[in-house]
Amino acid sequence: MTGHFAGKVALVTGATGVVGGAVARAYAKEGAAVLVAGRDTSRLSEVVKLIEENGGRASAFAVDVTRSAEVAAMVAAAVSRYGGLDVACNSAGVFGMLEPVADYDEDVWDDVLAVNLKGVFLSMKHEIAHMRAHGGGAVVNVASNLGAHWRLAGAGAYAASKAAVSFLTRTAARDHIADGVRINAVSPGPIDSPMSTRPGETLDERDARMKTALPIGRVAAPEEIAAAVLWLSSPASSFVVGQDHVIDGGAAA
């Protein structure tokens, strides 16, 4: 551990996902005590175990980020277990389905918007409330290059929700920088995960497609996204406020 977050407390929602898990591990590697939060308790336990096996400190909290009382309890758990909350990464999200707008299922639409947008709103609401009352902090939301920066046919709900996260981040940043809470976002492109493959496509086939589909010629490693999140939540980026950092290998350039 290099200890850039030694003595700090970090909270990561969506910690069972590819990006959230990488961020949680990165915070722990840098010395933070990490509350890993999500809906799947068995996968949360696996994330905690992996962090502890590598010398880190973490614990799990089961939460539905669309429910305000549960999100408030999540923040309270970080404070009660570790003594505070310094940084948070809001990574919980779902993709939904690929269908034209006219054919999109309304229940799926509601679920995508609830998790991806309301979940970020509620997470920030309760994280910021604690941070501004205790000397400040840093929040990084996970948006996507798909939305405000790039489009994909059939992904209307996901794109709309992630574009909204980008603009909600900027508004919240202006609202709360005077409170000492610094808020930014990251917008990843395709990542080395099942979501980057097409139906029936192997990883080798995906990698071959990405050689021409992305200017950089490959998908991102989750650790590359985590590195940006840690920078945005560290003193190294102390003058960065309300920005949406696109990390997509040049797709939206």
Image (spheres, helix red, strand yellow):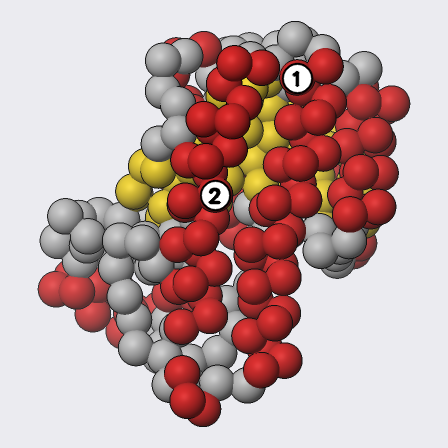
Residue 24 occupies quadrant: top right
Residue 102 occupies quadrant: bottom left
The residue tagged 2 is 168
Vertical order, 229 against 149 (above or below): above
Q: What residue type is labelled 1?
A: Arg
Disc marking residue 230: none
Vertical order, 226 against 163 (above or below): above
Task: Identify the residue shown where x is 59% and y is 77%.
Answer: 108
Question: How far apart in space, not on screen, are marks 2 and 1 (Cα)?
Answer: 18 Å
Task: Identify the residue shown where x is 64% and y is 51%.
Answer: 119
Q: How crowded is mark 2: few (under 14 residues within 10 Å), some or many (20 or more)?
A: some
The residue tagged 1 is 132
Task: Identify the residue shown where x is 45% and y is 10%.
Answer: 235
- Sequence order check, earlier mark of 2 and 1: 1
Q: Where is residue 26 in the image (x, y as percent from the top left)?
A: 53, 30
Q: Where is residue 15 in the image (x, y as percent from the top left)?
A: 63, 45
Left or right position of 2 against 159? right
Left or right position of 7 against 149? right
Q: Do the residues labelled 2 and 1 touch (CB within 8 Å)?
A: no
